[in-house]
Image (tube, helix red, strand yellow):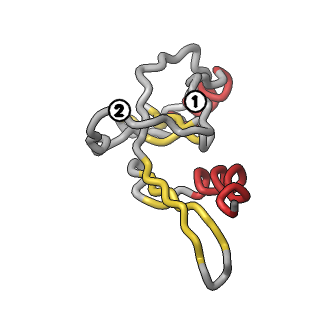
Amino acid sequence: MLSYSPIHDEFWPELTEPLPETDGELPLYRYGNHQNIVEKDRILQVLAESRNGEEEDGFQTVVAAVNSYDQQKVEHIPCLEFQLYNQEQDKFYARVWNTLLQRWDETFEKQIEEKERLVWRE
């Protein structure tokens, strides 16, 4: 099973750890595309590439085509957003901790800064 992030336009391997618990419903990312639509051709390409090269009983599996796929469920990943100010550089910036990736998420940070940095100055 693969996970797809429309914000990152990336596919990630199956989750090995459970998602973090949350208390109640969290707001959705304000700049996200919440329609959960993924191009069929893109998914089929990634699925075919992900299966190529896997060995089974000493034989390499080569995928010639993927005819269909099923979207299982939509998981919203909790992220922590910080709006920071560096007084020495007189600069505002965003930091976003992605709880799934367990790292700072530059994709979210760049989107937020592009859309909001000027408003933070006001």
Q: Is 60 left or right of 67, judged from the image as shown?
A: left
Above or below for 94 versus 62 = below
Circle 1 sits on which residue?
48
Q: Are marks 1 and 2 in contact (CB under 8 Å)?
A: no
Q: Position of residue 52 (x, y in %)?
A: 54, 36
Q: Position of residue 5 (x, y in %)?
A: 54, 38
Dot 1: what SS?
helix
Dot 2: what SS?
loop
Residue found 54% across the figure and 67% down from its top? 84
* Residue found at the very far front of the displayed protein: 122
Q: Is 50 left or right of 110, judged from the image as shown?
A: left
Q: CA distance from mark 1 to mark 2?
A: 35 Å
* Residue found at the very far bottom of the displayed protein: 88
Q: Which mark is residue 38?
A: none
Residue found 39% across the figure and 37% down from its top? 26
Above or below for 59 versus 93 = above
Name the image quarter holding residue 90.
bottom right
Circle 2 sits on which residue?
25
Residue type at mark 1? Ala
Whichever of labels 1 and 2 marks the residue nearer the N terminus, that label is 2
Whether residue 99 is visible to the viewer of this picture, yes or no, is yes
Of residues 56 and 100, the one nearer the viewer is 100
Residue density around tag 2, few if under 14, some if 14–19, many if 20 or more, within 10 Å:
few
Whether residue 55 is visible to the viewer of this picture, yes or no, is no
| Mark closer to the observer (1, 2) | 2
Q: Is 4 left or right of 88, judged from the image as shown?
A: left
Q: Position of residue 102 (x, y in %)?
A: 40, 57
Q: Position of residue 72 (x, y in %)?
A: 42, 20
Residue type at mark 2? Glu
Above or below for 97 versus 61 = below
Of residues 38 and 21, the one nearer the viewer is 21
Task: Count every numbered label the image shows and give the total.
Answer: 2
